[in-house]
Image: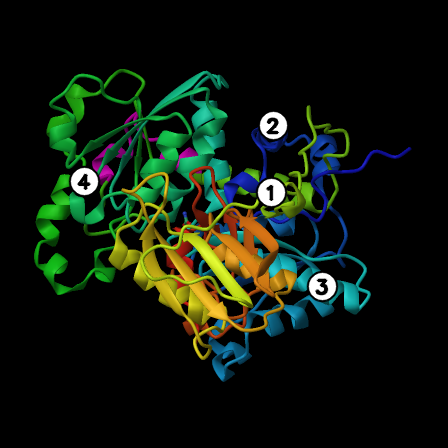
Amino acid sequence: MEQQNVFASRSLCVIEDFSIEERLYLFEQVKILKRAMENQDAATLEQYRIDDKDFGIYEVFLEDSTRTKESFRNAANFHHAKVSELNSDSSSFNKGESYADTFYTLSGYANTIFIVRSKLEGVCRWLEDTCANYAKRNKLYRKPAFINAGDGKHEHPTQELLDEFTFLEDNNWSCDSVHLALVGDLFHGRTVHSKADGLKIFKHVKVDLIAPVELAMPEAYVQRMQENGYEVRLFESIEQYLQQSDVADKWYFTRPQLERMGDRILQRQAELRRSITFRKEFMDTLKAGTKFYHPLPRHKVTPTIPTFLDETPFNGWERQSINGMYVRIVLLALLAGRIGSEFQPAKLAMKPEEEDYIQEVDLSCQQLREKVISEGVQPIHDGLVIDHICKGDCPSEIRDHMRLISSVLGLDEAKGGEWVSTGHKDGTLYKGIIFRPGLYELSRKHLKRLSAVAPGCTLNLIKGGKVVNKYRLHLPPRIYNFEDLGCTNEACISHPDQSEGVPARFYRTNDNRFACAYCGKKHTFKEIWKSRKK
Ligand code: CP
């Protein structure tokens, strides 16, 4: 039986889309290709070449770029493929066309790999899904693959690949440990955000974050690094960093994007730039073998790595940039299925087991207990009672959330009410109860909706004075298929203000929050519902 190429037609939307094992395989291939390029070894290079003038690679850059765009273009030319570029200044984006319609059109013209840069976060994940459906309904030969060439402040996974390759090159190919200082605009920089998961290729990771508070790494990424087991330290300036002795041997600088930050910050720009700019006087404090990296561009007037460093052994950024084309040649060869068929993952990714988060209680086993009627709540003859809402929260929060639940379930116009009480067993924990007299039938979709908006609650359906159905509802593994939900990140493709018609999708994280499937923003279950479209 022919072995399946696990890389063919895959998308790379975030760095985690390729497992550690897959990335290490890719780096092995880049090593071989780079050597072949340097030695002009035509026979080896031929093994990597797609060599198909009809293989469509399309660049769609809706933000400026030199390195990513041109290294991909040169990589695609290496492959003797059909290389196209959408001119965003004169495209029908300017007539209000959606991303989906634009990429459907381009997919229909025999294009297989799209390289997309946009300020909208999560755009490639959306296009990967929706264009797969388009390819199916139009019987296209292949489903298109998407490569994220930088999406807003979110991720830049191909930059991460070339950074990791360069770090390994300078680490004698050892994955044992890395000590990296990230310096500069850690708030806006998507290249440093990709490091939160990217650096997992190393067994021991120490990251020093050097940025003034105005440009500090967002808390969500710091938290992710810590969850991934990295040792993380924070400093406000290079000067402060060098006052202690445990200094990294790899420094990764990023460009301050102060222009995005309003007048108050601009007034302080000289001071902020100084805190993250390397100076001659610091040179003696560095360890032998220290390397500096930068995704580039650096600013010609205010570079954080000044040009006096170009001719020193600290210069790692030029080789880093050159590696970009090699990494991208190999990435295109993998997604095209030209190489990679001999790669076998050590363990196949397991499909998560379906969770029973809606549990119907077997009422035949339940002993009838005399109900203690407390605080004015009377049993209802027919209707529904949702109990144990937001158990443990304070009464005002519970009331707010009950109003939301009532609205989400469409119960606002019905008889009944909301109540805040304490449990019989624990008189100190508050909980909410919603009761609605009347005849109710609830569908599976209603139960899913209730699980997503009131996890931990119990739903009782009452007919003729008896509980006929009782459900315990737990936190669902995913929240999706609700038209009124949207991600709260305004830069996300699924935010309602983007008007892209992208249905929100969230998946539960290890800390029982919900990450947007497109931009990764984490929400509590309450936050998801607060931003819902009415
Ligand atoms: N590193 C990087 O993304 O550079 P460009 O913006 O020039 O593509």
Magenta-tinted stretch? 305-320
As measured in the structure, the alpha-carbon distance from the residue carrying label 3 to the one carrying label 1 is 47 Å
Q: How is the image coloured?
A: rainbow
Proximity of marks 4 and 3: CB atoms separated by less than 8 Å: no
As measured in the structure, the alpha-carbon distance from the residue carrying label 3 to the one carrying label 2 is 29 Å
Q: Quadrant of residue 182?
A: top left
Residue sitting nearer the eye, 339 or 126: 126
Task: Kindly report which numbered mark, 3 or 1, lies closer to the viewer in this rendering.
Answer: 1
| Residue that label 4 marks | 276
Q: Amino acid at mark 4?
A: Ile
Q: Secondary structure at mark 4?
A: loop
Q: Residue furthest front?
A: 370
State the quadrant of the N terminus: top right
Q: Which mark is residue 219?
A: none
Q: Amino acid at mark 3?
A: Asn
* Residue 452 in the figure: left or right of residue 396: right
Q: Which mark is residue 21?
A: 2
| Residue that label 1 marks | 366
Q: Quadrant of residue 428?
A: top left
Residue sitting nearer the eye, 70 or 247: 247
Residue 496 % position (x, y): 44, 71
The 10 Å Cα crowd at callout 1, few under 14, some 14 to 19, many 20 or more, is few
Tell me: is circle 1 under 8 Å from ligand 1. no
The residue positioned 21% from the left and 20% from the top of the image is 286
